[in-house]
Amino acid sequence: MSNYLVLIEYAETETQITAIQACIDAKSNRQAALDLNIDLRGLQRTIRRVERNAARRGYSPDHDMNKTAPEGYIVKGTSTLYDDEGNTKIQWVKTSNEGRVAENLANILEDYKYKPAPKVAPPTAKQNSDLATLYTLTDFHLGMYAYKQETGDDWDTKIAAKVMVNAIKDMVHKSPDSELGILNIQGDFLHWDGLDAVTPASGHILDADTRFDRMIELAIDLNAWAIEELLGKHKHVRVIICEGNHDLAGSAWLRKTIKKLMANNPRVTVDDTAMPYYAYLHGEIMLGFHHGHKKANKALPLLFSSEPRYRAMWGAATYAYIHTGHYHHKEVDSHENGGAIVERHQTLSGRDAYAARGGFISQRGAVAITYDKVMGEVERVRVLPREQ
């Protein structure tokens, strides 16, 4: 088991450390699995993940790789010079910091263990089956840092968590007992998309208050909590996590993670659409969603009416409401062009330095909108950001 004594140095999560240490103590994988009360195959998968971590860092004795890369880097390739007896004389190691995002995400989710959340008891209050309440959070920018003296508002992950919890609670408490609750994460829930705090497309440097690992974990926790809060209010909950320009990849893994976490809750449906346009038909009312980074508001009625996967839904609806974000301020197409009202939502998030220095000003807030299956919007609750 001496190999495990070296291998434990490359364990990167508590699960991995526990597994390798159990193998060292038990002196056999099978006994270690029994001691940990886990499946042997599960233990072996964890060990293989540590072995891959080690190989990425340059340690794989079976392949004559013994020169490790610094923390935060991976080995892209090696070149080895052998003597006549086959012994290693010189080894060149090529390293890179690319690929660490996916690796770190896999490690984080391994500790999370994808344990489906337990079933939540249905609400006891009488539900109105004609109603659906839409809870929208857009441009939340979890992980962003803002300094009040510069931007007008303080913002960091601790503040963000308090603001989101209070906003969801306020909206749930004040909204009617609709049979359906829709959690609409309208894009840019995460402030950045990888190990470096930069915008995905242009690489602009962003103000960040935390590390990528912590932001991922908090994002999962906050969304899982919000869904459970809605489950206590509504008989059915639908979850929409829109792609944003700040979280092109983050929105995808967050959506997939929430879908797995809620696998044991039949009252939860996660929209797993793999394109940045989402829709749901509530009776005769169509609800459309897009962050706003790909298409302007005025172009969205035509897009949703002509998009093949939504064409039948559009035809079955007597009216449509399309929701966007992206610019952080409220904007409603009052002309109802194309048979739809297009509404851009405000954000609960504080301004960052870019917005403040650019002179962009908007009120902060979030709304829960209740729709009747036939009449459309019938009630609206607006909340303001609060930490207490």
Image: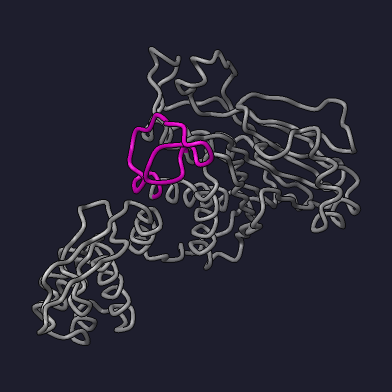
Residue for point 53% across, 34% down: 167
For image coordinates 50% across by 56% down, the residue present is 253
**Quarter the C terminus occupies:** top left
Along the line of sight, which residue is nearer the eye, 77 or 326?
A: 77
In the rendered image, residue 284, in percent from the top left (x then y), is placed at 86, 50
Q: Is residue 165 visible?
A: no
- Position of residue 12 in the picture relative to residue 291 (left or right): left
Q: Percent x, y for residue 87?
A: 11, 79
337, 355: nearer the viewer: 355
Task: Indicate the quadrant where residue 61 lies.
Answer: bottom left
Q: Say above or below: 56 vs 248.
A: below
Q: Position of residue 355 (x, y in %)?
A: 52, 20
Residue 8 is left or right of residue 336, and the answer is left
- Please determine whether, in this image, residue 275 is positioned above or below residue 155: below
Percent position of residue 211, x then y: 33, 42
Q: Is residue 331 magenta?
A: no
Q: Nearer the viewer, residue 28 or 369?
A: 28
